[in-house]
Image: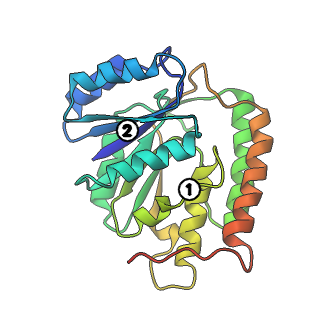
């Protein structure tokens, strides 16, 4: 199992000790850290982490900042070259604890028809979900727009904790560069919907499992700002026009 962690100027807040603990406690997990053109000491921090477990930690350095989506895509394509049963990606701030990786894996093990497990930030009794009010309400508005556009009853597309079963179609979802820097999660879903529309392959609502997270804590220092909500809506409209509007692009089928 390989987890991709995109990093951009994370030297000041990367929880190295928590990654060290995960390497000790999650023996079947390897990490691919993608340095997305950082200008601080991120590269040195990641290299120090790699030396602790060189057989389970890889570091990819991108020559310039290309955005979270392309950093994740580069990491996933690298992971696909390895012999992994599951590949995922996780936000570097660890708003979602790394212990959830094992929980997501258990879902995939127990449900053979599920191809993707997405973390969902649902405030339920007995769970610790701490989000700033503005981000919560903007997030709910965004999720409603996306769910309506995709015609898919998904609660939380943007949680940065996802795990995929390695299948013949996974590579196709990540093969082409993303149109958007930040709402690439929506683009993955649009690609999946487009590729399976009108086929007898299992449809998105049958292969995606949203797991209500036990813990998610908004970590200070996020690079997402209120104005990004407006940009995100623009990105969603672009995604719709490219993948889902009548006469739009047709996804290549897996070979």
Question: Which residue has dot 2 on it?
Answer: 100
- Nearer to us of marks 2 and 1 is 1
| Residue at point 66%, 50% (across, down) | 180
Q: Nearer the viewer, residue 170 or 209?
A: 170
Query: For numbered disc 2, what is the local secondary structure?
Result: helix
Residue 216: x, y in percent?
51, 31
Would residue 76 be visible to someone looking at this image? yes
Q: Residues within 10 Å of mark 2 (few under 14, many from 20)?
A: some
Query: For numbered disc 1, what is the local secondary structure?
Result: loop
What number is the disc on residue 99? none
| Residue at point 79%, 34% (across, down) | 227
Q: Nearer the viewer, residue 239 or 118?
A: 239
Q: The C terminus appears in which quarter of the rendering?
A: bottom left
Residue 20: x, y in percent?
28, 22
Q: Is residue 127 left or right of residue 29?
A: right
| Residue at point 39%, 55% (across, down) | 164
Q: Nearer the viewer, residue 2 or 62?
A: 62
Q: Is residue 86 left or right of residue 203?
A: left
In this rendering, is residue 152 above or below 39? below
Would residue 121 be visible to someone looking at this image? no
What number is the disc on residue 177? 1
Cα gap from disc 2 to disc 1, whole angstroms = 28 Å
In this rendering, is residue 78 above or below 99? below
Q: Give the residue furthest to the front.
A: 63
How was the colour assigned to the protein in this rendering? rainbow
Q: Is residue 48 left or right of residue 177?
A: left
């Amino acid at each position: 199992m390989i987890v991709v962690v995109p990093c951009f100027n994370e030297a000041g807040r990367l929880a190295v000790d928590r990654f060290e603990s995960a390497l000790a406690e999650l023996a079947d997990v390897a990490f691919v850290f993608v340095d997305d053109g950082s200008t601080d000491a991120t590269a040195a921090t990641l290299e120090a982490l790699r030396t602790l477990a060189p057989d389970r930690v890889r570091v990819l350095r991108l020559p310039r900042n290309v955005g979270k989506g392309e950093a994740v895509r580069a990491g996933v394509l690298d992971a696909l070259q390895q012999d992994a049963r599951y590949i995922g990606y996780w936000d570097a701030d660890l708003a979602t604890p790394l212990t959830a990786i094992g929980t997501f894996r258990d879902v995939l093990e127990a449900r053979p028809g599920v191809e993707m497990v997405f973390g969902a930030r649902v405030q339920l009794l007995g769970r610790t979900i701490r989000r700033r009010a503005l981000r919560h309400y903007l997030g709910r508005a965004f999720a409603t727009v996306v769910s309506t556009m995709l015609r898919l009853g998904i609660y939380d597309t943007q949680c940065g904790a996802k795990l995929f079963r390695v299948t013949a179609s996974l590579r196709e979802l990540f093969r082409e560069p993303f149109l958007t820097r930040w709402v690439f999660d929506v683009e993955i879903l649009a690609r999946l919907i487009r590729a399976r529309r009108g086929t007898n392959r299992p449809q998105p609502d049958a292969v995606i499992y949203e797991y209500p997270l036990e813990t998610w804590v908004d970590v200070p220092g996020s690079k997402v700002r209120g104005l990004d909500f407006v940009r995100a809506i623009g990105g969603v409209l672009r995604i719709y026009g490219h993948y889902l509007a009548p006469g739009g692009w047709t996804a290549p089928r897996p070979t």
